Image (tube, grey):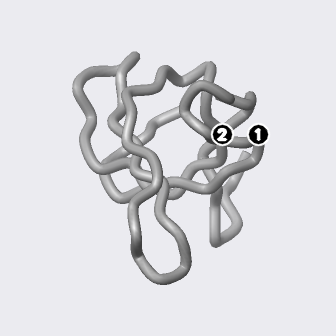
């Protein structure tokens, strides 16, 4: 999985201490390295309700176009 800045991701597990539900949609705003990504979660008005560092095991890269497998 090659996650880059501005990729859209979904949270694979609930993080109740952060008030984030499984399936929450976020945007990668910074790639620290292959194992650490800063992800912003925002509502439809653009108001941030979560910003945290996640690992590849915590997120699923969402694709908007077909990709060869």
Position in image of residue 60 (x %, y %): 65, 40
Residue name at image x 46 percent, y 26 percent:
54
Position in image of residue 8 (x %, y %): 52, 57
Q: Which residue is mark 1?
A: 22
Q: CA distance from mark 1 to mark 2?
A: 5 Å
Residue name at image x 57 percent, y 49 percent:
9
Q: Which mark is residue 7?
A: none
Q: Is residue 12 left or right of residue 35?
A: right
SS of the residue under disc 1: loop
**Nearer to us in this view, 15 or 26:** 15
Position in image of residue 36 (x %, y %): 36, 22
Report which quarter residue 15 is drawn in. top right
Q: Which residue is mark 2?
A: 11
Report which quarter residue 46 is drawn in. bottom left
Residue name at image x 66 percent, y 39 percent:
11
Position in image of residue 27 (x %, y %): 44, 55
Q: Badge 1, how many Cα within 10 Å: few under 14, some, many 20+?
A: some
Q: Is residue 38 left or right of residue 55?
A: left
N-terminal-most mark, 1 or 2: 2
**Nearer to us in this view, 50 or 6:** 50
Q: Marks 2 and 1: in contact by CB < 8 Å?
A: yes
């Amino acid at each position: 999985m090659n996650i880059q800045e501005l990729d859209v991701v979904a949270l694979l597990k609930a993080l109740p201490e952060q008030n984030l539900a499984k399936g929450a949609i976020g945007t990668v705003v910074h790639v620290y390295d292959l194992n650490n990504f800063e992800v912003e979660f925002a509502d439809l008005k653009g108001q941030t309700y979560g910003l945290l560092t996640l690992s590849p095991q915590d997120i699923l890269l969402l694709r908007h176009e077909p990709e060869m497998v």
